[in-house]
Amino acid sequence: MGNHADKALIALRNHSEAERRRRERINAHLSTLRTLIPGTNKMDKAALLGEVINQVKELRRSVTEATNGTLVPTDIDEVKVEEHEDHLNDGTSFSIRASLCCDFKHEILSDLRQAVEALPLKAVRAEIATLGSRMLNVFVFSGEDGEGGQILVNSVREALRSVLDKFYASEEFSSRNAMASKRRRVSFFCPSDSSSSLGDIW
Amino acid sequence: MGNHADKALIALRNHSEAERRRRERINAHLSTLRTLIPGTNKMDKAALLGEVINQVKELRRSVTEATNGTLVPTDIDEVKVEEHEDHLNDGTSFSIRASLCCDFKHEILSDLRQAVEALPLKAVRAEIATLGSRMLNVFVFSGEDGEGGQILVNSVREALRSVLDKFYASEEFSSRNAMASKRRRVSFFCPSDSSSSLGDIW
DNA sequence: TACAACACGTGATCC
DNA sequence: TGGATCACGTGTTGT
């Protein structure tokens, strides 16, 4: 019968339809990119993508220069830890960026140092920025991929949190009153007050 | 002879080659986007573009929140004018963003007001931000497309420049000495000093 | 006429 | 095998 022929024909039609859907997905994304980036309305596909690339680079520039390259402690105590999956050459390497923002106390710094050195990771970068009575500590760790990613992230987070908690405990002991709110206002930005070298501090 | 056939064949080959080059241009851009955005290495074309869209949105968020939504006057006198081609629904509408940054003087404000009102455009938004002795004025004009775009941009630019020049002239008259450098340092950022409503000022 | 950009269907390849 | 993705050449249209 034409059974084989029917099968083949149906398969072929499915194929072309699938391909059509694929094109539609891609073009839809290109379309939203056009709406996202001004002036790309009547551009070539290639030109559009070129503009997209420029925009991404431009925005990256803007965001880093808006921060002025200077890390600024906020008025809110917090610890942030995130993994980065550095895929240099489709690679087997990752990095973890960890930060701790809190009041500036020398005892915290030594606790922090101990906690960081106790971690099964090498810190490839460390920065301390102070602003008034506040401090922001940033560490970048690197790993070789294979060691459990999220597990490491969690241990780093726990390490920083324990440092912060220890500080809270001692603080609560020394002055039990002014602890109502952990948040403090810091009014002004003082560039010369910000430091990025460690030797001076610990 | 096969002259016609030759021609046709060559044409066909040119065609396919041109198409190949086109694909290469597009894929090259997609490739650099992959290098630009982490984690997209083994993604689908469509998925890649999706990630690109997310990145653009994310970066836009970051840059606006890094500026804190607050316009800040710099220490450099300047006027900037740019066209924006608001293509809402593949549209016939554009907008012009114009800004003037300079020392804060009341006379400048009234001159500025006159200059802006004399323009053949309606201002849909206006903001004034002050910081110490400095001010940043931002205007957004809208037009219906069809009126000469770049010509309007130039006239807006000229209007703002004339305001600035007039100020320079009067300043030069009043104090001929301290004019060596137009640039002044403004050290600190004071949020409460920044205003976005006009009624209070003019 | 020739060139540029696009959408389409098809064969190849990889899970 | 079937489903998904890709590169390719071709038909079509606009300049």
Image (cartoon, coloured by chain):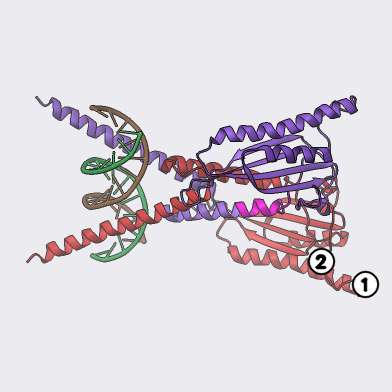
Chain colours: A red, B purple, C brown, D green
**Circle 2 sits on which residue?**
A183
Residue A172: x, y in percent?
A: 88, 73
For image coordinates 73% across by 55% down, the residue present is A138
**Circle 1 sits on which residue?**
A175
Foreground: B185 or B18? B185
For image coordinates 70% across by 52% down, the residue present is B66
Foreground: B99 or A109? B99
Residue B14: x, y in percent?
A: 27, 32
Q: Is residue B153 left or right of residue A184?
A: left
Nearer the observer: mark 2 or 1; the answer is 2
Q: Is residue B137 left or right of residue B153?
A: right
Foreground: A78 or B53? B53
To which chain does the residue with label 2 belong?
A
Callout 2 and callout 1 share a chain? yes
**Which range of residues does the magenta coloring cover?**
B60-72
Q: Is residue B112 left or right of residue D10?
A: right
Label 2 SS: loop
Query: For residue B18, which numbered disc appears in the image?
Result: none
Mark 1, other Cα within 10 Å: few <14 / some 14–19 / many ≥20: few
Reply above or below: B183 against A76: above
Label 1 SS: loop
Q: Is residue A93 left or right of residue A201?
A: left
